[in-house]
Amino acid sequence: MARFIFEGVIGDLDQALAIRHYHNFNHSKQKRFPESIIISLSQFDCRLCDKLISDNDVIENFSELLEQFAIENGWANFKFKPENLLSDAEIWERWALGIIDKANNKHVYNSAFLKNSLKDDELEKQLWLSGIHIFTSDD
């Protein structure tokens, strides 16, 4: 049985285009920060992007939305492990369930999984970077 893992297929640009086109989330100065948060948190997961964008106040509610998403996907039975401690079988299983993907030659966890695993420091880093992106971009 062959296994083909398509890693790193969805990126920030893909999520931005999906938000603006598929979801009709029009680009304006007021929506740049929520858009950046959605892109940063959803990373590679289009389903999570859908959940975040469907909320009227993602800035206020993202934490609860991430927790709900992890519960809906049944990720409570999986424990967080640093990338270097994951076996090939664990990487495959987590990838197949949407828990992990690969970007820039390293595995990254889904934000909802990180929230469920009480890895708030990683989420805060993602949110911080999304804010920096907004305030340093030219448009």
Image (cartoon, rainbow, N blue to C red):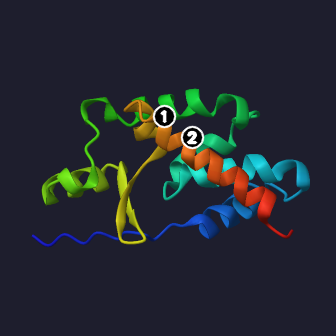
In the rendered image of this protein, does residue 67 appear above or below residue 113? above
Q: Which residue is mark 2?
A: 124
Residue at 57 percent across and 40 percent down: it is 124
Q: Is residue 81 left or right of residue 136?
A: left
Relative to 111, 31 lies left or right: right
Residue 3: x and y, percent?
Answer: 19, 69
Dot 2 amino acid type: Glu
Q: How much space separates mark 1 and mark 2, taking CA atoms?
A: 6 Å
Front one among 6 and 118: 118
Q: Quadrant of residue 135?
A: bottom right
Three-letter amino acid code at disc 1? Asp
**Left-right relation of 53 to 3:** right
Splitting the image into 4 quarters, where does residue 116 fall? top left
Check contact, mark 1 vs mark 2: CB within 8 A. yes
Circle 1 — which element? helix
Q: Which residue is labeled 1 in the image?
A: 120
| Residue 96 pos. (x, y %) | 29, 55
Image quadrant where residue 8 sits: bottom left
Q: What residue is at 37 percent from the left and 32 percent from the top?
A: 117
Which residue is at the far left?
1
Can you say whether 124 is above or below 103 in the image?
above
Q: Secondary structure at mark 2?
A: helix
